Amino acid sequence: MRLGAPNDVGRAQVGWMMGGAAIARGRQAGERTRDEQQPMQVLSEIRHATMDELAKCRIIAEAMDGRSAESDYIAYLTNVYHYARFSPVIMAAAAARCCQTHEKLARYLLKHAAEEQGHERWALDDLSKLGVAPEFVERTRPTAACAALVGYVHDQAAFRNPVAIMGWMYVLEAVGADIGTAVGEKLGQAHGDKSNPIRFVAGHGEADASHAVAISQTIENYVQTPEDRRDVCETARVVSYLYTTMFRQIGDERATWVSS
């Protein structure tokens, strides 16, 4: 785990640029056209690419194999706490800015924000069952990628194009739908002697399947302009990069650009 003084997530916005700027530099005009004309196809491809990258992460591979180390799981849940507590805030901020331009999308975001309210307490409850006190968790810092992820989507919601956060929501809901239930079952087997500390993972695995369908329909129905479609797809790319990087950082996997 990364321990230390409390983190000001707002300062983390710089971190996303390491991956996000590199992704943006590589974009071609043809990709932008596909984002505008076939956004759901593009998002589906990002979804599959995200799953491929997650499968390469050590802690995901070990969890799926039923070999999840308790220290890795604690580190994961600690990062969950740090991003889950901001999710409804970010969605509500985006909804407020969508009210005048995307009324139906604003209603969807407000509804989803209410559903996500308090989910960080699920993570704290699981951590308590693993012997980690809430007061201790609150004093930890998230990984750099986790902090950057929160900072990036908050910047989109509050200062840039609020519609773009649909790309963030799509990626996270898709991951939960694709592997949440299976990972929850494996974690339950690995840590079943600890009063089943899998409320967050299992709860999202069950809910995210329907959420993934709903968010896909919402994007299809209410994200219509070329700019909105481009921003949703680009946000999904950046979030995919940061989310998979978060798991690599939790597992202490060396970044490929760092020399030995």
Image (cartoon, rainbow, N blue to C red):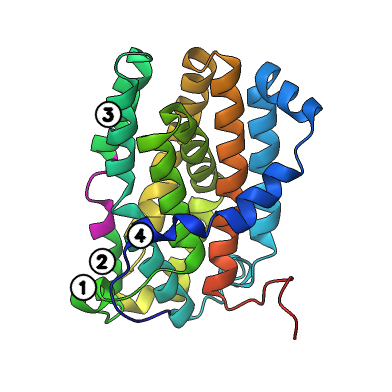
Query: Can you give x and y, in whole percent of width and height, for residue 176 in the image?
Result: 49, 47
Report if the CB atoms under discs 3 and 4 are less than 8 Å apart. no
Q: Which mark is residue 39?
A: none
Above or below: residue 67 compared with residue 26: below
Q: Amino acid at mark 2?
A: Leu
Toward which corner of the image does residue 47 lie, by quadrant? Answer: top right
Q: Residue at x 66, y 77 (%)?
A: 254
Tell me if I can see residue 38 in this picture: yes
Above or below: residue 128 compared with residue 233: below
Tell me if I can see residue 49 in this picture: no
Above or below: residue 237 compared with residue 18: above
Q: Is residue 154 left or right of residue 182?
A: left
Upstream in the sequence, badge 4 or badge 2? 4
Who is closer to the viewer here, 75 or 212?
Answer: 75
| Tally of marks | 4
Q: Secondary structure at mark 3?
A: helix
Query: Secondary structure of the magenta portion, mostly?
Result: helix
Q: Secondary structure at mark 4?
A: helix
Upstream in the sequence, badge 1 or badge 4? 4
Graded by Cα atoms within 10 Å as few (under 14), some (14 to 19) or many (20 or more), the crowding at tag 4 reads many
Q: Which residue is mark 4?
A: 9
Q: Amino acid at mark 3?
A: Leu
In which quadrant is the N terminus drawn?
A: bottom left
Give, as a single range, the part of the protein colored magenta: 116-121
Front: mark 1 or 4 = 4
Task: Report how far apart the C-alphas of labels 3 and 4 lie in the structure.
Answer: 22 Å
Q: Which residue is mark 2?
A: 124
Front: mark 4 or 2 = 4
Report if the CB atoms under discs 1 and 2 are less than 8 Å apart. yes
